Amino acid sequence: MESSRQKIILVDDNLANLTIGRNMLKDTYEVFPVPSGLRLLELLEHVTPSLILLDVLMPDMDGYETIARLKADSCWSDIPVIFLTSKNDEKSEYQGLSLGAIDYVTKPFSAPLLLKRIENQMLLSSQRLALRKYNDELEDKVEHKTGQVVQLQNAVISTVAYLLEYRDNLSGGHLARIQKYLKLIIEYMLNKKIYYDEISGWNLMFLIPSAQLHDVGRVGIKDAILHKPAPLTHDEYEEMKRHTTIGVEAILKIAQKTQEHAFLRHGAVFAGTHHERWDGGGYPAGLKGQDIPLEGRLLAIFDVFDALIYDRPYRKAFSIEEAFRMVAQGRSTQFDPVLIDVFSELKDQIARIGSEKD
C-alpha cells in the first residue's frame, strides 16, 4: 500500500550523510536517498516528491547544475529544493537562491532546525498549491459565467432577429445563414493570412452573432415600403436607406446604457456600413475602398448573395449559379476585389449554406 506521508528525496554523494539524513527524517517523511544528481533525475521519472534536499558539492554534476536542469523541465520545476551544503559563503548562498532554491542550509545543522525549516517550506508549498487550485477553479467559474452571459445574449439577439425576419417577411433563416457565411470566410482568411492583421484581433464569439443586428434599423421603415411588390420610387428608396442610420442609433443607445462591448461595436459597424460600395457609390456615408470597415465589406457580399437566392416581394429568387455570377460582376465596383476572390474560392461551401432553410 502506498504511503500517505509526504515524500522527500535526499541527494548527497556522501553515504554517511545519506544515512544520517534518512534517519533524521524517516519518522516524519517517506525518504528516498540518492547519491548523485543523475540518479535524482532518473528517480523523478517514477517518484514525485514534495521536496528535494540537494547537496551542492558533488562530482560529475554539482547541485547548481542539478537544480538548473530541474527548473528547466516543466514536469519538475515546481518541486521545492533546499540546498544542504558545507559552502557557507554569501556568494554561494546567493547563487543557490538565484537558481531557484527556496532555502539554503549550511552544514553542520541541527535536526530540529532542519525539520522545522522543512515543515515551514512544506506548509508554504501546500498553500501555493491551494492558491493555484483556487485560482484555477475561479477561472473556471468566470469562464462558465461568461459562457452563460454569451448564451443569454445570443438567445435574445436570435429572438429579435427572428421577429425582424417575421415582420419583414424575409426568407426563413437569412440571419442564421449570414452568420454561417461569415464564419466560413473569416476562418478561411485567418488560415490564409488574408487581412490577417485586422481579423486576428476579432473575437468571433462576439463578432459573428452581432451580424444579426445589421438590419435592425428596418424596424423604423414603413411596412408599405418593406413589402412593396414593385421597385421603390426615389423617395421610397431614400427612406429605405435610412435603416442603416436608424440601426446604428438604436445600437448606440443600448451601448450608452451598458459597458463598452465588442458585440455592440461590431453590430454598429455591420448596421452602418453593409450598404457601402467599394467604388464609393454606396450609403449612408459614401465610403470608398478600405475606408469601409472590413466587417461591412464582408457582410455586403453575403447580404446581397443571400437576398438574390430567395424570393423578395418585388421579384422571384435567382438560381445560386446566377447569384454567384451577379455578385462576381461587382468585383472592384460594388465589392472588395480581394474578398470577391475568396468568395469565389469558397463557392461550393457557400452554395451549401445558401441551400439551407429553417
Image: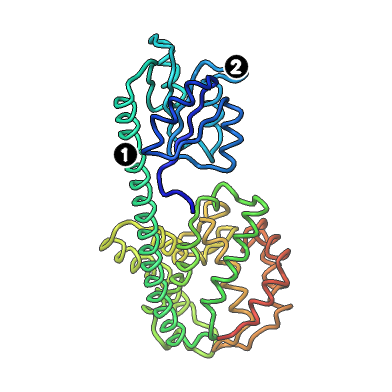
Which residue type carries mark 1?
Leu
Residue 71 visible from this viewpoint: no
Give 179 or 151, whichever is nearer the viewer: 151
Q: Is residue 264 left or right of residue 310?
A: left
Residue drawn at (44%, 30%), measured in percent from left and top? 22
Does 59 sit above or below residue 304?
A: above
Numbered tag placed on residue 123 in the rendering: 1
Which residue type carries mark 2?
Pro
Give 44 or 100, whichever is nearer the viewer: 44
- Hey, which quadrant is residue 318 in on the image? bottom right
Give 307 or 50, whichever is nearer the viewer: 50
Secondary structure at numbered mark 2? loop
Does 178 sit above or below residue 145?
A: below
Question: How dense is the environment of label 2, judged by Cα within 10 Å: few (below 14), some, or many (20 and up)?
Answer: few
- Horizontal and vertical percent for residue 242? 41, 71
- Hey, which quadrant is residue 267 in on the image? bottom left
Q: Say whether marks 2 and 1 touch (CB < 8 Å).
A: no
Residue drawn at (59%, 85%), measured in percent from left and top? 357
